[in-house]
Image (spheres, helix red, strand yellow):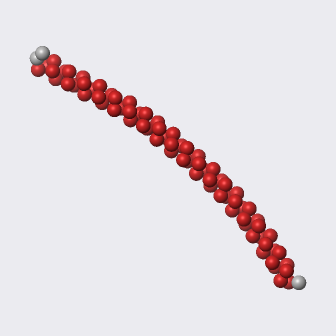
Amino acid sequence: MNCFEADSCKLLNRIKELEEKINHLRVSRRVLLGLLEKVHQENNELLEKMTNENLILKQKNIKLAKKLFANNIY
């Protein structure tokens, strides 16, 4: 095996290592994007729930304020 063949083997091995790393990074990227999408969806659901709860609390507050106001007048 001459110098050229040894260098070629080293380079081919390095290429294979880098290709494997690229494949692992692709998988990791897909997993992270999936997790990010899930968190985003959960945040949207939580925001909607909190918005609805806030609306209900505002309506209850208005009813209570009207009741208190009516009781203080008479």
In this figure, what is the number of numbered marks? 0
Query: Relative to 30, is 9 above or below?
Result: above
On screen, residue 17 versus residue 49, left or right, reads left
Rendered image quadrant of residue 47: bottom right
- The residue shown at (77%, 70%) is 62
- The residue shown at (29%, 25%) is 16
Query: Relative to 7, is 55 above or below?
Result: below
On screen, residue 17 versus residue 37, left or right, reads left
Q: Where is residue 57 in the image (x, y as percent from the top left)?
A: 72, 65
Residue furthest right in the image: 74
Rendered image quadrant of residue 23: top left
Residue furthest left in the image: 2
- Quarter of the rendering occupied by the C terminus: bottom right
Rendered image quadrant of residue 66: bottom right
On screen, residue 44 versus residue 57, left or right, reads left
- Quarter of the rendering occupied by the N terminus: top left
Q: Where is residue 51 in the image (x, y as percent from the top left)?
A: 67, 58
Q: Position of residue 9 (x, y in %)?
A: 20, 21
- The residue shown at (36%, 32%) is 22
Q: Where is residue 68 in the image (x, y as percent from the top left)?
A: 81, 78
Query: Relative to 22, is 32 above or below?
Result: below
